[in-house]
Image: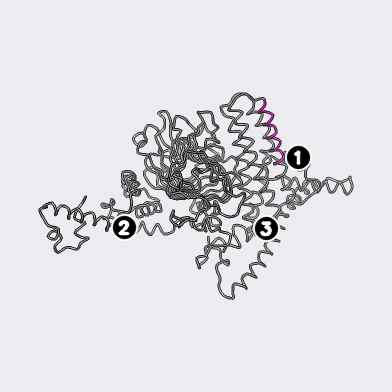
Amino acid sequence: MSLNGYGHVSGDQTVVNDGKRKKRIAIIGVSSLILVAMVVAVAVGVNHSHNGTEQSNGGANSGEISTSMKAIKAICQPTDYKEACVDSLSSAAGNTTDPKELIKVAFKVAMNKITDAVKQSDVLKELEKDPRASQALDNCNELMDYAVDDLKSSFEQLGEFDLSKLDEILGDLKIWLSAAVTYQETCLDGFENTTGNAGESMKKALKTSGELTRNGLAIVTEIASVLTSLQIPTFNRRLLSEESEIPANGEFPSWVSAGKRRLLAATPATIKPNVVVAKDGSGKYKTIREAIHDIPTKSNQTFVIYIKAGVYEEHVLINKTMTNVMMIGDGPTKTKITGNKNFVDGIPTFHTATVAVVGTGFIAKNIGFENTAGAVKHQAVALRVQSDMSIFYNCKMDAYQDTLYPHTHRQFYRDCTISGTIDFIFGNAAAVFQNCKMVVRKPLENQQCIVTAQGRKDKREPTGFVLQNCTITADPLYYPFRKINLAYLGRPWKEYSRTIIMQSQIDDLIQPEGWLPWMGDFGLNTCFYSEYRNRGPGAALGKRVKWRGIKNITPQHVLDFTAARFIRGDSWIKATGVPYTPGLSAVVFIIVTTYVDHRKDTLANCHSIEPISRDTLLASIAETGKQTELAVRVSTWKQKIEHSLEEQDLRPPFDIREYGGRVLDKLSLEADYGGAMSFAGAKRNMMLLEFSLQFRN
């Protein structure tokens, strides 16, 4: 997005513009504060006009109470649970009319209610005999701790409240409040398939806290909506946008750590990690679980763990105190973390993850995450992610049901491969997947396959899954069964499930209907599912389901789901060096026009196209928005050879000198044993390397 007026400057003009910028920030900051007060004042005024006949007979104190109550009612106006909002604030807010203080009180009351629910779970556990219910109660304790953390973050953010970053603050608040809602919902999900009354009792215990948390989300969303509608200059603009750009001199902003800046260029030969893990004993530790004890608590500095090639059979938790951790491996098929915890063996889905990441700012590169429990064990998570502003680059996640669990917060996946059978990407994060491959595996005989199951519970949550320039394809073992075990793009796990698939390759495994109901008509009218300019035989829209929740979005609307806007990626992804597309690709159409109109003759030689050219071709076809014969032929060709290409990528690079040397040694040996032609005679009138290429081992 262009930020007119806030671009780079040079020379003496920098000082002048800095002064103007600071003045502009101060003016807009004060204006924003006034505006927030106006939101309450206008609502209070409306309330007053509706009750103009009321008289205050209780003196000054009565007037204060009346004014405070009007402020409370104004703050609670946009909420879905107004009675709970008014009652909780009335008993806890005193006589304050400050809107910021009232919102902070709302967060604090929600935290107290969650704490009460945790105490209730301890009581219930003493009475609970069902092992699954007992484990669900344990999960609730952990999840409520996460929920309180996010509410505390929201509370503290309001306390600091830098008005020059109002847009960023409100964005953070919505993400954190959404996570608090999700954690409470996940607690209740844990009681499915349990016996006894613990689940129903916990639902009652969390009723008020859930309502208050969603009320907080509604209040923050309303403020954001008002600011947007009034077109406040700071809103949807970051005044200090220079910090999110990489300067022309190649240096990074001071707030980007050295470890993260090294990510893209890092190789086993060049990285300088804080700790090395190696199964063969060549590192400081042989296991990852040993290494993570070295991670400092709540550090702002990146802590780099290099994990050498090997299969690490262990379960790893990057807990909430382990912030800004980076794990780098030797490749997603070389460095692999594997486990086999699963639901059938009595473990709640939430705790089946081979690797769970909670601490903020996590980055993984060149690592494989795997759960080997198999399809017969049902839910078995390979990777669960709660880390806010986390990045996974060139990673692999393999399992069957529930492979990848993007649970909460903002997440970015680039050049990753995710494989599975049922709901194998599920959760309620705001997650963007770019240039990733989703591979559908062969399920059990009576099962269908579903790629996504997004779990947005409240319509105001800023969450959802975005698949951009991805490939949805079939594993070779599944491909012959694609007409028997049918595959779908997704289904609505929660009422407001949201998934957008755009500019992606969808192979012929996906059914023409595209999407699958969860149960009956649940979520069909309230979900948000959209497909935008996809390609491939599975991308045709003509026979898609006609639910109210299926949306046709405009080119303008789709920009809201690009990484720069949906997860504010410019502010935290761009400077890491990870390949990143902030918006839609603007140059692809030119590429496809050139290729289709002027290079049709090369189609017959598709087998010689390098992988990078192949990807460019597929991306180009997406921008045309047409299901051409070329797209179908390329898709068929791709399915046939992609596994051969993957094997080729694993081979060492070709060295012409080494190869030529082997050929010449062989020729010399044959000549020594009386070969039919001497070496000198064979190479006459030919360059040495040209001659060597005429032979094979």
At mark 2, the secondary structure is helix
At mark 3, the secondary structure is loop
| Residue 126: percent from left, percent from top | 67, 26
Side of 690 where 591 appears, left or right: right
Seen from the viewer's position, the closer of residues 162 and 231 is 162
Amino acid under disc 1:
Asp
Let me know if residue 290 is in the magenta part.
no
| Residue 537: percent from left, percent from top | 36, 43
Q: Is residue 368 above or below residue 163?
A: above
Residue 597 circle label: 2
Of the image marks 3 and 1, the number of the one nearer the N terminus? 1
Badge 3 is on which residue?
162
The quadrant in which residue 661 appears is bottom left
Let me know if residue 123 is in the magenta part.
yes
At mark 1, the secondary structure is helix
The quadrant in which residue 16 appears is bottom right
Seen from the viewer's position, the closer of residues 279 and 410 is 279
Query: Bounds of the magenta span?
Result: 111-126
- Alpha carbons under labels 2 and 3: distance apart: 54 Å
- Alpha carbons under labels 3 and 1: distance apart: 30 Å
Mark 1 closeness class: few <14, some 14–19, many ≥20 residues within 10 Å: few
Q: Is residue 484 visible?
A: yes
Q: Tell me the mark number nearer the camera, choosing from 2 and 3.
A: 3
Of the image marks 2 and 3, the number of the one nearer the N terminus? 3
Badge 1 is on which residue?
87
